[in-house]
Image: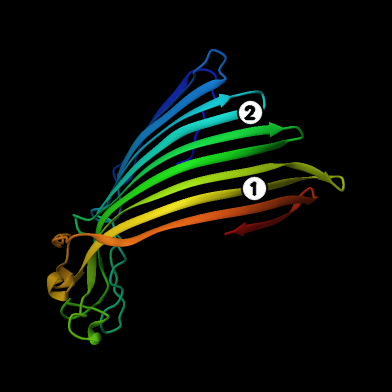
Amino acid sequence: MVRKHATSREFKGDLSAEYGSWNKQRYVADLQSPLTESGNVRGRVVAGYQDNDSWLDRYNNKKTFFSGIIDADLSDSTTLAAGYEYQRIDTNSPTWAGLPRWNSDGSVRHYDRSHSTAPDWAYNDREINKFFVTLTQRFAQNWQATLNATHTNTKFDSQMMYLDAVVNKDTGQLVGPYGNYGPGYDYVGGTGWNTGERKVDSLDLFADGKYELLGRQHTLMLGGSYSRQTNRYLNTWANIFPDEVGSFYDYNDDFPETDWGQQTVAQYDKTYMKSLYAATRISLADPLNLIIGARYTN
């Protein structure tokens, strides 16, 4: 989502509707208004909804989004922005890996572009909540410093299926790649139920501006950042064996949903990152620039 600021000192709004191929429909409302008589404090809200199918069989994607922001001119040279962003993305019958590429005799398989192995119960959903604050201070001679602080919380939930096999050209039976390892290794795919949550807190402080050198004007940016990311993911899964699929020639979206077991922790970690960076764009001639930069990350 591209962040939109409250720039208007008078009330204005925009309503749009969009329709397209594969039953696409999208609706967006964008409203902004001054919150003080002078207009030095302004607000903006953007809300929308999108629903579309795809050239892939059974695939559908729904997206709900909202953002609200307040922009304030604290002085002639200082601005403050604070806001909230929300997204909900629900995908039905998504693919997980591709289609069986080969027949067991080594010949290549061919498909209609709409062909999908995703069953009708499969889904992949995400929910994103973000809070942010940005403080900008402008200085003389085209320099400014910016401080960004954000907190992002993302939740994941998916149940999907994949096939990993070749196809017996005569019978349509799937043949897994690991069958030679022994009994129980003849699986031809799998299903997985994955959930999780990712939290990211970050600070970014940088300054950028112009400077004169050897009679030409150049630009410089330097800054530092800090972030903390916490991941916690749960999952449970099941193998798929050839007799569960039957002939791949007869396969459609009626593969039964897995009797899901109890989820267990698949990953839990925290990552801390500190960075310093600098870059300059040197004007060598009117049509020619040289960019030099460096970054240190711990």
Residue that appears at 29% across and 77% down: 102
Question: Element type at marker 1?
Answer: strand
Residue 78's disc number: 2
| Quarter assignment of residue 292 | bottom right
Q: Nearer the viewer, residue 198 or 54?
A: 198
Cβ atoms under marks 1 and 2 closer than 8 Å: no
Disc 2 marks which amino acid?
A: Thr
| Quarter assignment of residue 120 | bottom left
Q: Residues within 10 Å of mark 2 (few under 14, many from 20)?
A: some
> Upstream in the sequence, badge 1 or badge 2?
2
Looking at the picture, how far across and down is residue 15, in whole percent? 40, 27
Q: Residues within 10 Å of mark 1 (few under 14, many from 20)?
A: some
Query: Vertical placement of 44 versus 120: above or below?
Result: above
Residue that appears at 28% across and 63% down: 112
Q: Nearer the viewer, residue 44 or 227?
A: 227
Query: Vertical placement of 210 versus 290: above or below?
Result: above
Question: Element type at marker 2?
Answer: strand
Q: Which residue is mark 1?
A: 223
Q: Is residue 130 left or right of residue 243?
A: right
Q: Is residue 216 left or right of residue 7?
A: right
